[in-house]
Amino acid sequence: MKQIVVIFWAFIFGEVIGYIGGQLDALPYTPLEIGIVAAVVALITSNMIPLISKPKK
């Protein structure tokens, strides 16, 4: 369930950030591509944080 929530919010935030960035740089706005990239980056990040922050034994 956690992964679905991460994908959902990453897609939403990616769309907002992509739209604002596209308007500032006068670049074309491709919603699906931006959303997928944001979701993939968020999934990788959310799965790597616990691995990185494990205490050493």
Image: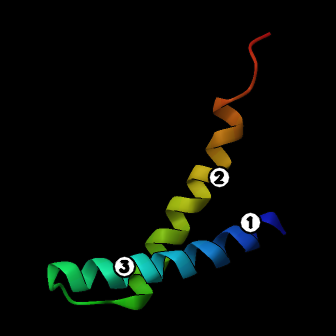
Q: Quadrant of the C terminus?
A: top right
Q: Position of residue 18 (x, y in %)?
A: 36, 79
Residue 20 falls in image quadrant: bottom left
Is the C-beta separation of discs 2 and 1 under 8 Å? yes
> Residue at image x 74%, y 66%?
3
| Residue where numbered disc 2 is placed | 46
Dot 3 amino acid type = Gly
Label 2 vs label 3: CA separation? 20 Å
> Position of 56 compared to 8: left or right?
right
Label 3 vs label 1: CA separation? 21 Å
> Residue at image x 35%, y 85%?
19
Report the disc number at residue 3: 1
Which secondary structure, mark 2?
Answer: helix
Dot 1 amino acid type = Gln
Q: Using a 10 Å C-alpha cutoff, classify the residue at mark 3 as few (fewer than 14 neighbours), some (14 to 19) or many (20 or more).
A: many
Q: In terms of sequence position, does the residue under pointer 3 or pointer 1 come before the other?
A: 1
